[in-house]
């Protein structure tokens, strides 16, 4: 009974905010991926179409992730500044991708003039896009200077959305293969890596802070205001929330601790959500808006996968509270998201169709353009 009382700590502001944020990001990334795919299909701009994973690529993701994890475990301190620089560049691009549709909507809604100012890499570049790019650069620069956790989360969310939009799963067969492999990957590196490498590799890498190259450069040049630049940075490969958010404190930690969730624990389920969203759209051919999704709640696979994600995430956090140890989130998220989709599609006799893949039409068009 005492253990069950500990679960009340999930009602603290930090875990609630983490859960709400993760669910919103996962759904938002899937929804953005769907609309990005529709935009590419509508404009027939397949030169920028998303990468659709095949079987070999799906199997290589856990392998390459394991290699990267080990390299980070042993060499992180040596390459952290390079990683920070690459992350900053990727974050600028991801932020630009994330906010571009909203800027275009506002421009259209208010009839704002947006003249072209230059052409770069055979593409037109407008004044509004230039301003957005400056804003994205300013956001990343602020993160490099302050290392503030909200900015870290903002960059991490943008990277997650960009990844899910550009890397697609073609069908449930490839999806199940990838999720099962990552299911095993997550369990091994969290629960068993210490037996082989002397430390919990996943936790060690997730909690390491990178050296800030901006601080290094400013220090070498003896620039003023050096004390305002943070020496260490949390890389935006995870979202973090202070345990004392709004005054709440979870037992087992102090006021400076953070709750964290890896981007993969949002991006991988979001790829499944993007797949079923595309399947729902292919079947109904409805206009894809949030209102349409809500009005068709009982008929869309997304409304089985999304609650499953929330249940899996809550289960992972509950297990962490009860055991006082890090948990592999995919241990809970894979069954809770993939399971309902497979079961419901089998009951509806649509599993074979979903197994073949709703992305096939777009993929065929890409091949036609290549030919």
Image: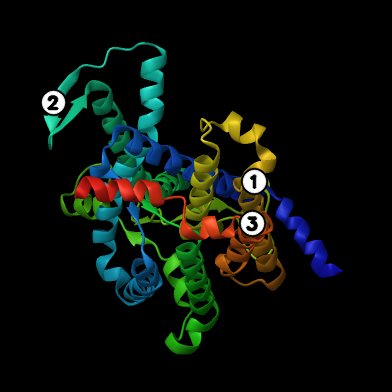
Q: What residue is shown at x 23% (from left), y 60% (from top)?
A: 82
Give the Cα distance between marks 3 and 1: 18 Å
Q: Is residue 303 left or right of residue 353?
A: right
* Residue situated in front as seen by the camera: 214 or 83: 83
Residue 260 on image: x %, y % = 53, 58
Residue 234 on image: x %, y % = 41, 56
Query: Which type of secondary structure does the marked residue at label 2 adopt?
Result: strand
Q: Is residue 129 above or below residue 268?
A: above
Answer whether residue 227 is visible to the viewer in this image: no
Give the Cα distance between marks 2 and 1: 44 Å
Q: Is residue 296 above or below residue 223?
A: above
Query: Which type of secondary structure does the marked residue at label 1 adopt?
Result: helix
**Viewer-nearest of discs 2 and 1:** 1
* Residue situated in front as seen by the camera: 32 or 93: 32
Q: What residue is shown at x 29% (from left), y 56% (from top)?
A: 84
Q: What residue is shown at x 65% (from left), y 58% (from top)?
A: 340
Residue 222 on image: x %, y % = 18, 49
Residue that badge 2 annotates: 118
Residue 64 on image: x %, y % = 34, 71
Residue that badge 3 annotates: 349
**Among the two numbered marks 3 and 2 on one chain, the one whose residue lies closer to the N terminus:** 2
Q: Which mark is residue 283?
A: none
Residue that badge 1 annotates: 303
**Among the two numbered marks 3 and 1 on one chain, the one whose residue lies closer to the N terminus:** 1
Q: Is mark 3 in CB contact (under 8 Å) with mark 2?
A: no
């Amino acid at each position: 009974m005492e253990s069950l009382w500990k679960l009340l700590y999930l009602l603290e502001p930090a875990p609630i905010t983490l859960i709400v944020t993760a669910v919103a990001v996962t759904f938002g990334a899937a929804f953005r991926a769907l609309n990005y795919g529709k935009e590419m299909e509508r404009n027939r701009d397949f030169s920028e179409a998303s990468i659709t994973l095949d079987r070999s690529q799906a199997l290589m993701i856990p392998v390459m992730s394991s290699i990267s994890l080990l390299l980070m475990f042993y060499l992180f301190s040596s390459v952290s500044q390079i990683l920070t620089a690459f992350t900053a560049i990727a974050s600028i691009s991801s932020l630009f991708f994330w906010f571009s549709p909203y800027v275009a909507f506002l421009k259209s809604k208010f009839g704002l003039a947006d003249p072209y100012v230059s052409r770069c890499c055979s593409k037109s570049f407008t004044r509004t896009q230039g301003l957005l790019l400056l804003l994205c650069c300013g956001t990343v620069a602020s993160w490099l200077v302050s290392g503030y956790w909200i900015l870290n989360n903002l960059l991490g969310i943008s990277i997650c959305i960009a990844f899910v939009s550009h890397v697609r799963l073609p069908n449930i067969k490839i999806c199940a293969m990838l999720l099962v492999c990552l299911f095993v990957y997550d369990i091994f590196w969290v629960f068993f890596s210490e037996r082989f490498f002397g430390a919990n590799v996943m936790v060690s890498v997730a909690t390491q802070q990178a050296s800030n190259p901006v601080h290094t450069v400013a220090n070498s040049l003896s620039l003023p205001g050096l004390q305002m630049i943070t020496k260490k940075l949390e890389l935006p490969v995870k979202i973090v929330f202070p345990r004392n958010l709004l005054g709440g404190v979870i037992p087992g930690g102090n006021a400076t601790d953070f709750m964290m969730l890896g981007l993969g624990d949002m991006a991988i389920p979001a790829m499944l959500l993007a797949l079923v969203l595309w399947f729902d759209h292919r079947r109904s051919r409805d206009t894809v808006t949030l209102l349409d999704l809500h009005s068709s709640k009982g008929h869309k696979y997304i409304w089985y996968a999304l609650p499953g994600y929330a249940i899996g995430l809550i289960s992972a956090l509950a297990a962490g509270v009860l055991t006082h140890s890090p948990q592999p989130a995919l241990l809970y998220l894979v069954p809770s998201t993939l399971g309902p989709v497979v079961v419901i599609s089998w009951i509806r006799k649509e599993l074979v169709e979903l197994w073949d893949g709703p992305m096939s039409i777009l993929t065929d068009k890409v091949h036609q353009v290549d030919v």
